[in-house]
Image (cartoon, rainbow, N blue to C red):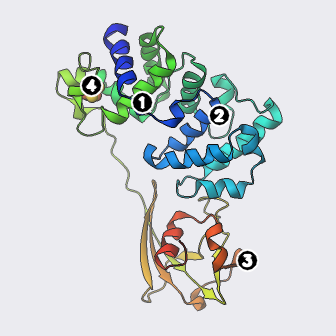
Amino acid sequence: MNYKTFTEPLINWYLKNHRPLVFRETSDPYHIWVSEIMAQQTQIATMLPYYENWIQRWPSINKLAEADINDVLKAWEGLGYYSRARNLHKSAQLLVEENSAQFPSSVDDMIKLPGIGDYTANAIASIAYKQKAIAIDGNVIRVMSRVLASEKDYLKVKNKNELKVILLNLLEDANPSYFTQALMELGALICLPTSPKCDECPLNQSCLAFKTNTQDNYPLKKVKKKNPVLHYDTFVIIKDKQILMSKDDSDGLMKGLIRLPQQPSKLKLIPIMTSKHIFSHKTWLINVYDDVSFLKENPLYEWVSLESLNNYSIITAHRVILTSLGHLK
Ligand code: SF4
């Protein structure tokens, strides 16, 4: 496998077939940074309107640094993993204070910013600055595990570094931005987790898994630990056009967002509704009650007018409940 059999067909395919995404039409490192952070754990179709709204509201690092964190969290509402929004905001403020609002150009400096890891830094370095940097995410690991018919765990640093060397050699003098995006796009559109479209794949001449019809064997699947299921009693208490909400985020989940009062499940009464929320690492099974007498007092509870409820950033698990009960639009 070499430049002629890998890189050239890959980039030619990319130039003809890639999706016209608005954040691929810019080389502004701030815009690319925002898009990469939003695209983590979120489908492109879902994050696109958020990205457009974000860039319109905060088109520069300076503007984002000046923004109120509550507005930033509100703009993120629905994307989940709110630490991403908090880190973008915090990093923007650090860049204004320490780097004249300039986004750094070296991978080492990018990684010092909160929320930027090895993948994101290398993606920005290659896409925005056209540096010979290799960004390895789940898509790239899937493509390369199959191309190489490799059972290695490329999430391990040693193996990941080996893969970076292989890809750097294949990159040669190609445009690093196209190379990075082509690998990502191939993973997203062609080398799918199940039923890869090998007949349409520009790498099928060099892909060892395709040649041996073993695509489904790669990447090697790890046995997944079962996520814990947690049971909660959650309260929707309404009085005088106000609703009792909680600022208790002591479980570390979605810090800074408000939620309904909630306590570990104990009640054996018939709830007014039940709800299930699946996080990446746990599941909540929720019984919803409207009787305040079963709720323990907590200084972090406070009354919020029902009219203003739409203006708050509320954790998604409880937003769903409030919407089902007609208290949120
Ligand atoms: S030939 Fe098939 S398995 Fe190999 S990289 Fe292409 S889509 Fe993936």
Residue drawn at x 37%, y 55% as measured from the top left: 226
Q: Which residue is mark 2?
A: 30
Does the Cβ of the disc 3 residue fall within 8 Å of ligand 1?
Answer: no
Q: Residues within 10 Å of mark 4 (few under 14, many from 20)?
A: some
Above or below for 158 versus 48? above
Residue ID for mark 1? 184
Which mark sits nearer the N-terminus, 1 or 2?
2
* Sequence order check, earlier mark of 4 and 3: 4
Q: Residue 200, percent across and down?
A: 24, 27
Residue at 38 percent of width and 51 percent of height: 225
The residue identified by callout 4 is 201
Alpha carbon distance from label 1 to label 3: 48 Å
Give residue 53's position: percent from left, percent from top: 59, 49
- State yes or no: Cβ of the residue under disc 1 lies below 8 Å from any atom of ligand 1: no
**Relative to 189, is 291 above or below?**
below
The CA span between labels 1 and 2 is: 20 Å
Marks 4 and 1, how far apart in space? 13 Å
Q: Secondary structure at mark 2?
A: helix
Q: Nearer the viewer, mark 4 or mark 3?
A: 4
Q: Is the shortest distance between ligand 1 and the CB of mark 4 under 8 Å? A: yes
Q: Is residue 195 left or right of residue 296?
A: left
- State yes or no: discs 4 and 1 in contact (Cβ < 8 Å): no
Identify which residue is drawn at 48% across, 8% down.
173
> What mark, if any, has residue 299 been given in the picture?
3
Q: Earlier in the sequence, mark 4 or mark 2?
A: 2
- Callout 4: SS: loop
